[in-house]
Image (spheres, helix red, strand yellow):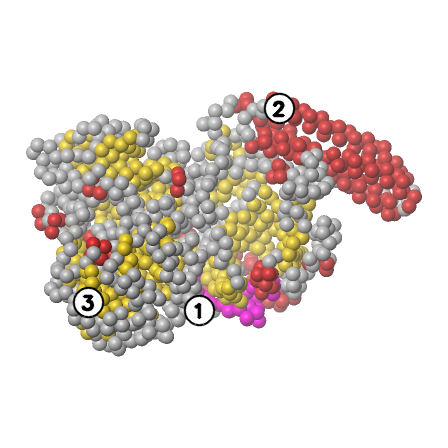
Amino acid sequence: MKKIALLILAGIGYTMALAQEPVVLTGDELFGSLKARQIGPALMSGRITDLAGHPTNARIIYAGTAGGGVWKSADGGSTFTSIFDDYAQSIGTIAIDPGNPDQVIWVGTGETWTRNSTSVGDGLYKSVDGGVNWQKVGFAKSERISSIQINPTNSDEVYVGVLGPLWGTSDERGVYKTTDGGQTWERVLAGDNHVGCSDLIMDMHNPQVLYAAFWEFGRTAWGFNSGGDKSALYKSTDGGKTWAKIHNGLPTGKLGRFAIALAPSDSKILYAAVEAEKDKGLYRSDDAGASWEYLNKDFNLVVRPFYFSRIVVDPRNPDVLIKAGLFGSISKDGGKTFKQLGSMHADMHDAWFDINDSDRFYAGTDGGVYRTWDGGSNMEMVNNLPVSQFYHVSVDNAEPYNVYGGLQDNGSWFGPSASPGGIEARDWTSVGYGDGFRVYRHPQKDFVYSEMQGAEGVWRYDIKRNQTRDIKIFPVEGDPKLRFNWNAPLTLSPNNPDRVYIGSQFVHRSDDMGNNWQRISPDLTTNDPAKQKQVESGGISRDNSGAENHCTIFTIAESPLDENIIWVGTDDGNVQLTQNGGQDWQNVTANISGLPKNTWCYHIEASSFNKGTAYAVFDGHTANDPTPYVYKTTDFGRTWKSIVTGDIYGFARNIQEDYVNEDLLFLGTEFGLYITMDGGTHWTKFTNNMPAAAVHYIALQPRTNDLVLATHGRGIIIIDDISPLREINQEVLNKKVHFFASKPFVMYEESGFGGGSNGNQFIGPNPTRNAKIAYYLKRRHTFGKMTMEVRDASGRKIIDLDPLKKRGVNIVTWDYRMPLPKMARGKTFAFSGFTSPRVPAGTYTVVMKKGKEEYQHTIELQYDPGAGIALADRKAQEEMVMKLYNMNQDLAYLVYQIDETIAYANKAQESSPKLKKTSSSLLSSLQELKETLVITTGDNYVGMAEKELREKIGDLYSVVTNNFYKPGNSQYANFAILDKALEEAKTQYSFIKNKELARLEKTASKYNLESMQVDTFEEFLKNYK
Amino acid sequence: MKLKLMQTTLALVLTSVMSFAQSADEIIANFFENTGGAEAWEALEGTKTKGTFKQQGMEIPVTEIKLKDGRSYTIYNFQGKEIVGQAFDGEVLWGHNFMSMEAEKKDDESTENFKREARDFPYSLFKYKDKGYQVELLGTETVEGAECFKLKLIKKPQLVDGQEVDNISYFYMDTENFVPIVVEQEIKSGEMKGKFIWVTFSDYQEVEGLYFPFAITQGIKDMGANAFTIQSIELNPAVDETIFSFPETTGEEPKDGDGN
C-alpha cells in the first residue's frame, strides 16, 4: 500500500509543479468517450485504387482505396476490415512481402489515378506485424507512390516507384531502392520535375530484372496534361544499376501513360498499354521487352489512361489478361481480342486473381470491390466496404434526422442518422445521378435539392410523390457562357425557406424553389481567359469532362442573421460580399494577408453570432500548396485574421462554427478533423474512431448537437452530441472532476423491430438512446475504488452504474432501467425475468464516489413526447409494473423459504429416523406447493415444461413493462388472477409452516436440531443471486 | 527499496517520462514490484474472485477460480441457478449449455488454445520467458488519456480454423505506475475478426499485499464494453478438487466452489 501511496504522492507533486501552466491536452487526452460513429453507407462503396493478395493464402486480400485507407479480408473477400485508419487514406499501392507474407506489408500512399478530386499521400509505410502497427519509412513529400517491388529471396531489398506530386514540380520522383528493409534509400532511376514512375514491376523469377514506366503529367486547377517527350519504358537487368529504354516496336512521338504487366508464368511475355499520339493501344512482347507487337486499340484499352493504366495477367496462363477501363475487359487469347467484364460499377482500376483458381478474381472500381466466381461473366459486389466518397453533407430536423450528400461517381443520397437494427443499405434513398455533390432538404417541405457534375442536372425531388423536376439554369439574353464548377455551389437560404442559390460565375437566386431564377451578381471571379481552355485539357488524350471548369463560384453563404448579407468565394481566389441582397458587391480578397493570390476559396461560414463575422477556408493544394488557410473577419471583410496554428496537418476545406459557443470551431482537413475550443488559439485533432480521412464538409445538427462529417473516402461520420466541448475551458480543465450540463433526456418509446442485413453487409451503428452522464476527469482513475449510482428525487438508490475512468471526457450511459427483479429459483429460467422496469420521468441524481470524495450531478428524464400516451395512462402502467415486479420478488422469497424448509426437513430426516414421518409429510406438502409455483422439470428450450405461477407472473410483467400504455382489460383481469394465486400460495405456505413445520421443529428440538433460520425479506434481496 | 522506487518514479514523472530508456523487462519488473513484489506473486497458488458481470442490462454474479497449475472454473448465477461458463481441469475444457443446462465439452480447437495459455496465471507477463513468450517495447502511446508504455506480447500461436496464427496482445502500462490499464488483442475468427478486443483495468486495490484491478471492462475497441466489477478476491483459496472436471453424469447441479 505504501508503494502505491508514494506513487500517488509523486503524481501530486507533478501536478502542483504545473498548476500555473495553461492545460493544453492532445486529442487522446481530452476527447475520451466522445467517439465518432461511422455510418457508411457501403451500398455504393467508393473508389478502389489497388488490390493485392497473400501469395500462399487465398483467404487474405487487401484493398487500397482512393480516400478510405487500406482494408484487409481474411475470408476470401467476404468481409473487409480497415487496417490503416491513422494514416493518409489515399492509397497508391499495397505490396505483400513474398518472403514474409504474414508479417510484412508495405503501403505507398497517394492515389495514382490522377483525377481532379484525387487526394494526396504522405509517404511510404511498412508493417512488420500483418498490418496492426505501421511505421512511415520515408518519401514524406512524394505525394503519390505507384509501385513497390520486393525481392522474393531478400525481404530487405525493395524497390519503390514514386510518381510524385500531381499539382506541381518536384524532383522526388523515380525509382528508389533499399537494401536494408527501408532504413536507407538510393534513387536508381531519376524522373524529372513533371516525370514520375507510374509503374514498376519485377521479374519474380529473376529479381535483378525490373521494368519501369515513366510518365510526364501534371494538373492545374483548370487543366490536365498527360504526355510529353519524357514518358518512357525502361528495363534494368542488374537490380537497378543500369537502365535501358525498351521502345522497339512502340509508337514514336510524344507518349503518355503506360500500363505494363509481366506474365507471372512466363518471364518473356510482357504487355503494355501505351498512350500515344498515334498507334495508341495494347502491345505485347514475347522476348522480355526486346521488341513489341501492336495488338489492339479497343476503346477499353485506350480510354482515359490517367485513370485506367493497369493490366493484370493470370498467374497461370500468360494469354489471359485483364485491362482496367471504363468497364474493364478480359482477353483469353493473349490480347488479340477482349470481352467486357460482367455488369459492375463503371471505372475499374485494378484486379487480383485468386492464387488457386483463375475463375475467381476481384475487381476494384469507383463503386467498390467486386468478385467473380466464373471468370468475370458475373460480378458480385462486396457489401461491407464503407469507403464512400462524399463531397458534401447537410442534415434536416426530422426525428431521427436525415443526412444528405453527393458522392464521387455515385450519385446523391439521403439516409437516416439512426434506424431500428442499425443503418442498413435499404435505409438510403437515391436522389440524383452521376457524380453527386450538394444535397439539401427543403426546411419545411418534402423536397430534396440535388445536382450532378457541373450543374448539368439540378433537381428538386418530391419525396412524397416520387417526382423529379430539373431546375437547372439556362443562359438568357445577354448571358455569356455560364461556367459552373464540377462541384457547383448549390445552397439554401437560412432565412427564406423557398430560397435557393446556385453559383456559376454569377450568383443565381430563386425564391420559388428553383422554378424561376434571377441573376443577382456580376461575374464575381477573375474571369481569367487563360484558365478557361478546358477544351484543350488532357494532353495527348483529350479529356474535357467538365472536371477542370474554372473561374467559377465555389461557395455561397447567406448570413443566418440577415438575408441581405451574402458571402461568395470563388475557385480562383476571390471573396466577395454583398450587404444589400446582391445589388452591390465588394471584393474583399485584398484584405486577406498571407494568402497566396488566386488560392481556391473552398468555404465561407457566415457566423450565427455577428453579422460582420465570417470564416473563410482556402485550399491551395491544386497549386501545389499544402498549407491550411483559415481566416476570420469580424468587420465584414475589412480585416482578416488567420486562425491557423502549427497543430493543423494538411490543407483545409471546411469549417463549422458552433451555434452556442463561438470559440468552438470544427475544421475539416485532408487528414481528418480538428477542433478548437478557444477560437483558434489551439487546435486538437480528433482521433477517437475517426480515421485520417479527408473531411470535405461539416454540418452541425442544432437539436441533437451532432457533428456530421462528409468524408471523401469513409462515408458519413457522426460525433454524437458535442455539447460537452462547449464547456471546456481552463477552469474546467483544472478541476479534478467536472460534470457537463445536459438537456433533459427523452426516453424514446420506439419499436425494436428492424434489421434484415446479414453479417456480410455493412450496418451503420445507431446512436445511444440512453441518458448520457458526461464528466471530465483531470487524471485517469487507476487506483482505489470509484463508484457511481443513480438516486431518485427522494434519495433512494435506483441502480449502480459503471463509471468510466479516462482522463478527459467520460460518457456513462444509463438505459433508464432499474435492476432486474429477483426471480424464483426453478429448474429452468424464466426469460421474462430478464426485463427491467423503466423509471418514471423526473429528476435523478448521479452520485459518483472517487476515493473519499463524492460528486453529485442532476439529470432530468422526460417521457417520449411523440408517443401520444397520456400521463395518467403512464402512471397506471408504472403502477402495475411495480406491483408485478414486487410479486416476482415476493414469489422468489416464497420459493426461497420453501427451499429452505425442504432443506431443513431433509436435514431433520437425516438427523434422526424418528423425524422421518413428520418431515416426509412436510416435504410432500412443500413439494406439492412448489410445483405450482415454479417449473421443476425440463430445459430452457423446447423441452420446457408447462408454465407455473412464476412464468405466468413473469409473462404479464414483461409485457406490461415493455409497453408504455395503460394496461388493457385482459391484463388487469390476468393480474387479479395472479395476485390471488400468489396470496393463496403465501397463505398455504404459512399454513404449512405454522402447522407442519412447527410440529417438526418442536419434535426436532428434542434431537438437538435447532429451529429453521431464514433470511428476512430484506436480507434475501441482498443475498440472493 | 521503497525509497529507491520513489526516486525512480519521481524521476520518471517529473521528466514527463523520458522513458524510452526503460526496457520491456524493467517495465514488467516494476509492474510486479509495485503491485506486491515478484516473490509474493510467485508464491500465489490461486485466486477466487467474486464479482458482477454486466451485460445487456443484466447484472450477473460470477465466481471465478484460477489456479497456478492451469485449472480454472467460472460460474454464473441466473435466478438462483448456477451455470458453469467455463471450466478446465488441465485436459478438458467444458461448460454448461444454456438451453439444456447440461455440461458439454468445448471443441478440440478451443481446448487446445486454452491449454496453450493455461500457465498464464497470475498474468501472462509474469515470468513470460519461462513460458516461451516474447515481449517487445513498442514505445509510448496515450490510451484512456494516460501515457502508457506499449508492450507487445507474443505467445504461442493459436489455432484458427485448423491453421496456426500469431497470438499477439498489446499491454498498455501506465508510465506513472507501470500497471496495465489496457490490453488489446486482435480477434482472429468469427464475425468480428480483424477488430480488436479492448480490455481496461482500474480500481487497483490491495489484497493481502498484492494489488489487483477490481474494475475490468471488456469489449470491442471503439464499440461498447461490458463491465466486470469485483467484490472480493480470495488468495490461495481452498477448493473442492472435483469441480474442475467434466461431470460424467447428467443433470448434476454445479458446485460454486464455496461448498454451498
- The residue mark sitting in front, 1 or 2, is 2
Q: Is residue A715 above or below residue A241?
A: above
Numbered mark located on residue A333 in the image: none
Residue A130 in the image: state x and y as whole percent. Answer: 42, 63
Spatial CA distance of label 3 from label 1 is 62 Å
What amino acid is labelled 3 in the image?
Answer: Glu
Q: Quadrant of the N terminus of chain A?
A: bottom right
C-alpha separation, residue under disc 3 versus residue under disc 2: 87 Å
- Protein chain holding label 3: A
Relative placement, left or right, of A813 versus A251 is right
**What kind of residue is marked 1?**
Ala
| Chain of residue at mark 2 | A
Span shown in magenta? B117-140
The residue labelled by disc 3 is A293
Indicate the position of residue A329 as horizontal and vertical percent values.
27, 56
Q: Quadrant of residue B33?
A: bottom right
Q: To which residue does mark 1 refer?
A: B21
Location of mark 2 (residue): A970
